[in-house]
Image: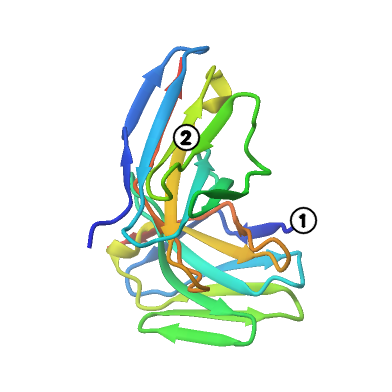
Amino acid sequence: GENVEQHPSTLSVQEGDSAVIKCTYSDSASNYFPWYKQELGKGPQLIIDIRSNVGEKKDQRIAVTLNKTAKHFSLHITETQPEDSAVYFCAARTGDTDKLIFGTGTRLQVFP
Amino acid sequence: EAGVVQSPRYKIIEKKQPVAFWCNPISGHNTLYWYLQNLGQGPELLIRYENEEAVDDSQLPKDRFSAERLKGVDSTLKIQPAELGDSAVYLCASSPQGDTGELFFGEGSRLTVL
């Protein structure tokens, strides 16, 4: 079945710097790749997603890139702010079962 | 618009006791999910409903876990008997009909088994 690996597990940046989180997946038939942000005591919330027919997508300070050949996708956050501090999860939807498989998460800390 | 509502938010029980979690999805959302989130891990799917039908329960430990969504709206997840390893956050999510992709999560029910 699908396996999603996420790196790094923790990431500390200075306010204003960029942050990059990377994920790899195993199922070449996976077709949908969302990123979720989870704040302490809350449920995950979708921040951006990308489908397999697109290589890059941007929404203000957040962008996601997808390399289908290498089976990896990345989240880029520019001009980080303290409120970006949270745990970020990547996920991949399997091609056969439509199941969403999550990575293990990255704890991002943005220091003022 | 109200989000996904879960209760209780926190539950502490002794092992071998039963526990139940309730979820009310966003109005009009046909698909409902129960996820398990262990500390420091990503959510893992337990069961997915399309209306009243459980379409994927392959990861649900059926010896002690059960779930129902009788009228295709709210849902209950039950554990009986609970074990120490069941301590985790149980997340409910819903999504509308069609391939929008986005899941809307509730705040979760944190279970501690002593």
Q: Residues within 10 Å of mark 1 (few under 14, many from 20)?
A: few
Total numbered labels:
2
Residue A87 shows up from this direction: no
Please state the horizontal and vertical placement of residue B20, each as a whole percent of the image.
42, 28
Residue at 45% x, 85% y is A58
Label 2 crowd (10 A; few <14 / some 14-19 / many >=20): some
Pointer 2 indicates a residue of which chain?
Answer: B
The residue drawn where x is 55% and y is 63% is A90
Labels 2, 1: front one: 2
At which x and y percent is residue A49? 50, 74
Left or right? Give the position of B13 relative to B15: left
Instruction: Tell me which colouring the rendered structure shows.
Output: rainbow
- Mark 2 lies on residue: B77
Q: Looking at the rendered structure, which numbered label has been put on residue B42?
A: none
Quadrant where the C terminus of chain A sits is bottom left
- In this view, the residue farthest toward the front is B71
Q: The N terminus of chain A lies in which quarter of the figure?
A: bottom right
Asked if A3 appears above or below B76 in the picture, the reply is below
**Residue A1 shows which numbered tag?**
1
Under mark 2, the amino acid is Leu
Q: Which residue is pictured at 45% across the width and 12% down the height?
A: B14
**CB contact under 8 Å: marks 2 and 1:** no
Q: Kindly report the distance in space between the C-alpha atoms of the residues bearing marks 2 and 1.
A: 25 Å
The image shows residue A15, relative to residue B83, as above or below, that is: below
Provide residue B3's location: percent of width, then percent of height.
Answer: 29, 56
